[in-house]
Structures are given as C-alpha cells and as structure tokens.
Image: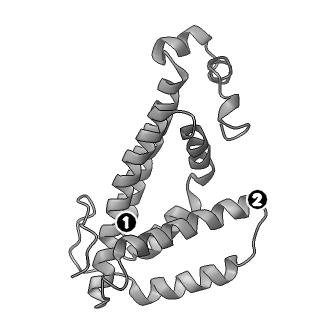
Amino acid sequence: MLEEGYAAATSRRVAAKAGVKPALVHYYFPSMDDLFLAVLRDGAETNLERQRQALADDRPLHALWQLNSTHGARLFMEFMALANHRKAIRSEIARYAELFGDLETGVMAAALRAHGVDAEEFPPVVMAMLVTSLARIVLLERGLGITRGHADAEAFIERYLQRYELPASDGRDVTEPGDGRAE
C-alpha cells in the first residue's frame, strides 16, 4: 500500500511479499477487506498504545504534536482513500477516530482547564483537532515537497504548546477519555 497504493495490494502480491502461496492468504483472509481490516486494526491498536504513552508523558501536548507529526500519515491516507470505496474500512476508521479523539480532547481539556482557559471560547475538541490535524498535514505536505508556511506553523504551535502544556502533576489518567469540556 505504501509503495504503490491500496489498489496495487492484491492477495497474490501480499502472498509473494510474505513468501507464501495465495491460498494461505485466502485461508486467513477470505477477502481483501478482511486483510485490510486486520492491518488497519493492528496499526490502530499500536497507535492507540503509542498515544496513551505520549499523553502520559511529562509534556503531553508536545508528545501529541510529535506523535501526529511522525507516525503513519502516509498509510492512514491510503486507508482514507480505500474508505471512499469500502464501507467496512470507513466504519472502522470512524470507530478508531472516536477513540483517538476522545483521548486527545481529554488531555487538551485538562491542559486548558489547568490554565484557566474558557472552554466556550476555545473548545478542547476544536483545539485538539487543530493541533493534530496541523501536525498531520505538515507531515503529508513535507512528503510531497511542500514547505510553504511550515516553519511559521510549527513556531506558532510550539508557542501554543509551551503556553498551555499540562502541568505534570495533574493526576490525569489517559486510559479513560475525558469529556472534552474544560470547567
């Protein structure tokens, strides 16, 4: 998928890369959707664990930026393209997006609350979306050779993260998502 796109990922090519016969691939994955879902779920679970670890970091907002700036954006885009044609993939991406989003919003809500930021004026869900989406788009654009505005965007985000970073001793539990509302 990364080398030639999702359309080039066939059971024969997967079997050839794995050094097995195509029948073995079909035995474990009766359809390509089954194989795609297995890869998606495995990667998403790995990334959820990475995210939980990042959000438990002493500087969780910085860790969230770093995680979204470095991991899996190209493969995620292939899955997004695939989701345009396959409902099962679309549903699974949406399910995991909710899990990721809940964790991101929870830590953002805690950080903004710790700094007395008005959640009505700066909704944690929106702020989390801005940080994570900007990180991913910068990563994707860099892969295409686009750099316009990246240095300015990264400097802006660094100032934002420095200003609103969550104090290390807030007692947060990243295994349980927050409600996304700063109080």
In the picture as drawn, the residue positioned furthest to the right comes out as 145
Q: Mark number for residue 144?
A: 2
Q: Residue at x 26, y 79 (%)?
A: 182
Towards the viewer: 62 or 133: 133
Image-based side of 93 in relation to 102, left or right:
right
Give how far across and how far down residue 4 sits, in percent.
Answer: 73, 37
Q: Position of residue 56 (x, y in %)?
A: 33, 67
Q: Amino acid at mark 2?
A: Leu
Q: Percent from the top left, x then y, of residue 67?
A: 50, 63
Q: Quadrant of the C terminus?
A: bottom left
Please tell me whether mark 2 sits on a helix, a strand or a loop: loop
Instruction: Identify whether 39 is placed above or below 66.
Output: above
Render colour scheme? one colour
Residue appearing at x 76%, y 59% in the figure? 144
Q: How much space separates mark 2 and mark 1, taking CA atoms?
A: 27 Å
Residue at 58% x, 38% y is: 82
Query: Which residue is nearer to you in this view: 183 or 13?
Result: 183
Place of residue 146 in the rendered image (x, y in percent of width and height, measured from the top left): 76, 67
Q: Which mark is residue 104?
A: 1
Please give the name of the residue rendered at 20% of the width and 74% of the height, measured from the top-left corner.
171
Q: Earlier in the sequence, mark 2 or mark 1?
A: 1
Task: Choose top left, top right, bottom left or bottom right for residue 165.
Answer: bottom left
Q: Look at the picture and state if 81 lies above or below 119.
A: above
Secondary structure of the residue carrying tag 1 is helix
